[in-house]
Amino acid sequence: MTEDLDSVERRAWSAVLTLAMRVPSALDSRLQREFGVTHFEYRVMALLLEAPDHRMRLSLLAARGHGSISRLSHVVSKLERVGWAKRATAESGRGVDAVLTESGLAKVAETTPEYLLAVRRLVMDGLDGPEKAELARLGERLSDHLVGTLGDAHEPPAGY
């Protein structure tokens, strides 16, 4: 039988769940209402913006965006339909890249100020300087733990 969580662990887990569910939901609502993009779509375009030549292999983009290949493929299809991204043969000749278009660059530039304002209001304004540093440290530690536990896969290993 699995050991129950103690009271501190229950509080910590409840806080993680609340943040993991409410922040992306609030960002989705705001970005969709004001800019016609989901949080994940914005994240994909922002990652492409930062990439050399605004292009990245689909598999790497999925991993860096913390989404499945299937989810990313659907998002890139939507971004293609609206003209914000396109697919292209990888420069190595093997695989497929997503490439941010000029229209996509403009969409990211238009959306970023409001996105950053929402992040500040939803999360950063609730913390002081040392707490922000502690949140960063704890988040990075947990992210490293997840990579160590799950590897690069998006599915838990057998037995989870």
Image: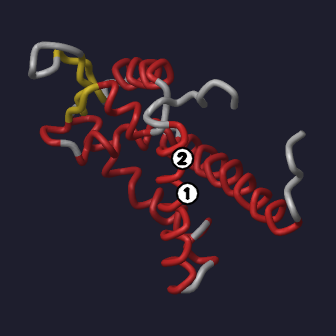
The residue beneath circle 1 is 142
Count of numbered marks: 2
| Between 35 and 150, the one nearer to me in the picture | 150
Give, as a three-letter code, the residue at label 2.
Answer: Leu
Residue at the image point whose x is 34% and y is 20% from the top = 80
Position of 42 compared to 93: left or right?
A: right
Position of 9 compared to 137: left or right?
A: right
Could you tell me how far apart the alpha carbons at marks 2 and 1 are, in whole angstroms? 6 Å
Secondary structure found at label 2: helix
Q: Which quadrant holds the N terminus?
A: top right
Residue at the image point whose x is 75% and y is 63% from the top = 12
The residue beneath circle 2 is 146
Quarter of the figure with residue 41? top left
Dot 2 alpha-carbon crowd within 10 angstroms: few under 14, some 14 to 19, many 20 or more:
few
User: How far across and how far down the image is residue 103, in percent?
Assistant: 26, 35
User: How far across and how far down the image is residue 135, in percent?
Assistant: 55, 71
